[in-house]
Image (cartoon, grey):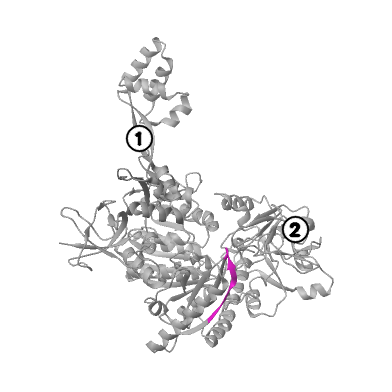
């Protein structure tokens, strides 16, 4: 007999598989989705291993197969195991990353009446027990959720469990309905020849059945079946007319599967490869040789902004397709996908698929199936697209590889897309290209060591040959204050904006904070209005005229007076994009303004609409957060103004300098991509900081050398690894005690194993000490092999373990 190791969709399963026997006649492959009995439920599972021996003595049979084909490839099975092991996540959480959209189905619980003994005295039951029996009496069954709604979750579960144990109620399970499936549209087809249909139509017309005649005549003119919606639109018919023709045997109705295409409304004109520069050609040839070798490899493509990295990606993908393989292209933000999709879809017409969270579930499902069937050459999307079921994977491109959004921060597994892509490429024998103008320090370190092959694109590729990077001016805002300038705009930036608007050019103003005022303080008593659930000040949003918590989205109206002292002396302090938009309107009244932040991109197509409007020059000044710092190509932008370069610089994080340098360099790179050249003005109160100086000089090497020197001294990545252990609890004191207990346990483990290179930092309150009503304490581990060290330890409820965090 053969046995299967199955990852089961249950929170109890954690990081282990469960052994099941294969019943006679049931064919099962590795990577196949199956139904398995788990306790008294029937749950989903995925087969990860087959063998002649089970891991336990007694096994149950697999109940059935969900889909005839495996849904995970061998490479994805290995990847899921690695993710679970490295990031210490439940195994099915890792498997779920790779499943079809809408695949997961929970088991719904139903309660029905049991057998009441003759003469049973209902008065012996508690009020809640009688209430539950009253709810299910006379009903075939009642959902547990309905009972929970009536009694409360905990009380309902305990009462139902008691009734079930005594046979007074019966618990049963049923899987929730399928969430996503192929879309089928009704089509009308002639059941007779076109000539016969025309003859019948003429007879119907004589009998005054004019609508039936019109419908039959219309179908006789078509070359094939016609969608029912199109028929109704063109001849104003209705279902009764169609049914009459069906009953006469003249027409048939058939449901045809149609694809929900997220690119259907986009007009994309095919393009041809551009003539590469010498640097692009050298980079492409290196990647080509890696593809030809068939052994994979990692390339770090370090090219300044506007140097033509995308053209290298496109030609590398074309070479991949020529070899009979396929590729995945990852971008850090959904905001970037419209422009990226346009370029790739134009080069690979009809062979590009898109995967991201703003697609409908049906669109995601259709795209996933299309990819799995091998009908696309290129998959494009943010971090989750790395798990696309792309067969014959030959190339993975990670654009803007330095971006923090490639890390999944608040949901298990807390993976980093770059590391997952590298591991997937290792398992699949694929090549990885990491592209950035400001590479992650750890990536560049690996390239310097020789782990990655470093490729350089040192110059820009622009319509005006030889156009240099934009000139950068650093404005010391301390000097502006001394000169009596109190405006958000320094004299230099104000003059440059006026000049650009006058010349019919475009401007980007960057400020990495939303809202209008970052906090409100009473000038009399010093009280600051804070979120009642989080340890953060509330931000004032001008357009909604409300205070908002950016951690939990709590809203409240702006009070007229101070809640503590009652005086009307509240002061709006700090600065956000809404305030910047207001001030820009006052200072530049003739300029057309556009704002791009998460407050104005709630709609499905918001990013595309804003970007399209700005590209069509329907606005002169674009004001935005880090969205405007991404890889956008806007030739009319001649000026970029960084309103405050110090926003992220003073955060208590060892990556603050790197983050600042990357943001400044990236946003500066939006200027001067057209024939008119460009200029950047950076406003700061710390102009001497090495990150700001290096960004102003477009000097990555100077920044890297300084940054890596600090990292080495402090034993920070890339010289070690980090793990962030966060405990959360509604009681601050209990949370602190639990964190201290965990530190003692960790110290004992380190001592007992004789580990010399793991250092414990903390426990200490998290940077945001209270979030969504729960206090948080952190322990930081610094060293090597941290996943292996932490794996056997048991973390109680309330703990979150983040391996390789991108921020502390």
Asked if 252 appears above or below 555 in the picture, the reply is: above
For disc 1, the marked residue is: 255
Q: Which of marks 2 and 1 is nearer the N terminus?
A: 1
Asked if 426 appears above or below 132 in the picture, the reply is: below
Q: Nearer the viewer, residue 122 or 35?
A: 122
For disc 2, the marked residue is: 584
Is-magenta flag for residue 763?
Answer: yes
**The C terminus: image quadrant:** bottom right
In x, y percent, where is residue 606? Answer: 58, 50
Q: Residue 224 carries which label?
A: none
Report the magenta residues as a range: 762-773
For label 1, count other residues whose C-alpha is less than 10 Å away and answer few (under 14), some (14-19) or many (20+). Answer: few
Residue visible at 52% across and 86% down in the picture: 712
Q: Is residue 757 left or right of residue 503?
A: left
In x, y percent, where is residue 674? Answer: 63, 60
**The N terminus: image quadrant:** bottom left
Give the Cα distance between marks 2 and 1.
56 Å
Quick one: SS at disc 1? strand
In x, y percent, where is residue 17? Answer: 30, 65
Residue visible at 43% across and 82% down in the picture: 784
In x, y percent, where is residue 537? Answer: 67, 65
Quick one: SS at disc 2? helix
Is-magenta flag for residue 134?
Answer: no
Q: What predominant SS class does the magenta segment belong to?
A: strand
Q: Which of 626 and 463 is in front in this view?
A: 626
Residue 430 in sight from this viewpoint: no
Asked if 139 appears above or below 561 in the picture, the reply is: above
Q: Which of 679 and 94 is in front in this view?
A: 94
For label 2, count other residues whose C-alpha is less than 10 Å away and answer few (under 14), some (14-19) or many (20+). Answer: many
Whether residues under marks 2 and 1 lie with C-beta atoms below 8 angstroms apart, the answer is no
């Amino acid at each position: 007999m053969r046995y299967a190791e199955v990852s089961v969709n249950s929170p109890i399963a954690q990081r282990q598989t469960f052994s099941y026997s294969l019943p006679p006649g049931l064919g099962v492959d590795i990577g196949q989705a199956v139904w398995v009995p788990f306790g008294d439920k029937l749950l989903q599972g995925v087969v990860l291993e087959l063998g002649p021996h089970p891991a336990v003595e007694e096994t149950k049979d697999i109940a059935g197969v969900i889909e005839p084909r495996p849904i995970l490839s061998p490479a994805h099975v290995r990847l899921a195991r690695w993710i679970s092991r490295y990031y210490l996540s439940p195994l099915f959480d890792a498997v779920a990353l790779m499943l079809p959209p809408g695949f997961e189905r929970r088991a719904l619980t139903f309660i029905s009446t049991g057998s009441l003994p003759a003469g049973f005295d209902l008065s012996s039951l508690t009020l809640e027990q009688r209430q539950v029996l009253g709810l299910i009496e006379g009903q075939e069954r009642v959902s547990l959720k309905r009972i929970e709604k009536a009694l409360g979750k905990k009380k309902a579960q305990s009462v139902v469990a008691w009734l079930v144990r005594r046979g007074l109620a019966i618990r049963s399970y049923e899987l929730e309905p399928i969430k996503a499936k192929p879309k089928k549209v009704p089509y009308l087809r002639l059941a007779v020849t076109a000539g016969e249909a025309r003859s019948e139509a003429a007879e119907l017309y004589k009998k005054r059945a004019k609508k039936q005649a019109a419908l039959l005549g219309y179908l006789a003119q078509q070359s094939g079946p016609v969608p029912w919606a199109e028929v109704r639109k063109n001849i104003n018919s209705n279902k009764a007319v169609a049914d009459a023709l069906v009953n006469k045997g003249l027409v048939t109705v058939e449901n045809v599967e149609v694809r929900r295409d997220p690119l259907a409304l986009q007009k994309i004109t095919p393009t041809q490869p551009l003539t590469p520069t010498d640097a692009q050609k050298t980079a492409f040839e290196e990647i080509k040789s890696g593809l030809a070798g068939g052994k994979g490899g990692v390339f770090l493509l370090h090219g300044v902004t506007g140097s033509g990295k995308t053209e290298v990606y496109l030609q590398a993908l074309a070479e991949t397709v020529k070899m009979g393989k396929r590729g995945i292209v990852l971008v850090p933000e959904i905001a970037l996908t419209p422009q990226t999709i346009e370029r790739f879809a134009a080069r690979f017409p009809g062979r590009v698929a898109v995967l991201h969270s703003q697609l409908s579930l049906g669109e995601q499902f259709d795209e996933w199936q299309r990819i799995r069937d091998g009908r696309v050459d290129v998959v494009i999307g943010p971090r989750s697209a790395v798990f696309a079921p792309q067969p014959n994977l030959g190339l993975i491109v990670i654009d803007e590889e330095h971006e923090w959004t490639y890390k999944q921060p608040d949901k298990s597994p807390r993976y980093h897309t770059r590391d997952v892509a590298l591991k997937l490429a290792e398992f699949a024998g694929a090549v990885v290209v990491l592209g950035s103008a400001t590479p992650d320090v750890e990536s560049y370190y690996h390239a310097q060591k020789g782990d990655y092959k470093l490729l350089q694109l040192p110059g820009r590729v622009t319509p005006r040959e030889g156009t240099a990077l934009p000139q950068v001016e650093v404005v010391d805002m301390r000097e502006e204050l001394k000169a009596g300038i109190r405006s958000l705009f320094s004299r230099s930036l104000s003059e440059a904006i006026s000049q650009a608007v006058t010349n019919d050019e475009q401007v980007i103003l960057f400020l990495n904070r939303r809202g209008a005022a970052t906090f409100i303080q009473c000038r009399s008593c010093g009280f600051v209005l804070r979120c009642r659930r989080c340890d953060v000040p509330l931000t004032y949003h001008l357009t909604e005229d409300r205070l908002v918590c950016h951690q939990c989205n709590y809203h409240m109206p702006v009070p007229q007076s101070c809640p503590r002292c009652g005086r009307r002396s509240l002061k709006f302090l700090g600065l956000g994009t809404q305030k910047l938009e207001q001030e820009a309107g006052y200072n530049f009244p003739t300029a057309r303004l556009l704002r791009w932040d998460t407050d104005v991109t709630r709609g499905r197509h918001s990013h595309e609409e804003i970007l399209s409007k700005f590209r069509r020059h329907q606005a002169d000044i674009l004001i935005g957060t880090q969205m405007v710092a991404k890889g956008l190509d806007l030739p009319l932008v001649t000026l970029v103004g960084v309103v405050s370069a110090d926003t992220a610089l003073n955060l208590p994080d060892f990556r603050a300098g790197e983050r600042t340098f990357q943001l400044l360099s990236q946003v500066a790179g939006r200027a001067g991509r057209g024939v008119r050249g460009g200029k950047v003005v950076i406003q700061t109160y710390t102009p001497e900081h090495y990150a700001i100086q290096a960004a102003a000089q477009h000097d990555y090497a100077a920044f890297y050398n300084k940054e890596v020197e600090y990292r080495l001294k402090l034993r920070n990545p890339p010289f070690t690894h980090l793990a962030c252990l966060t405990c959360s609890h509604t009681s601050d004191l209990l949370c602190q005690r639990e964190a201290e207990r965990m530190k003692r346990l960790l110290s004992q483990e380190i001592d007992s194993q004789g580990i010399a290179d793991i250092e414990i930092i903390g426990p200490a309150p998290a940077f945001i000490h209270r979030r969504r009503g729960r206090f948080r304490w952190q322990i930081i581990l610094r060293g090597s092999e941290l996943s292996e060290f932490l794996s056997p330890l048991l973390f109680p409820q309330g703990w979150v373990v983040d391996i390789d965090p991108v921020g502390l």
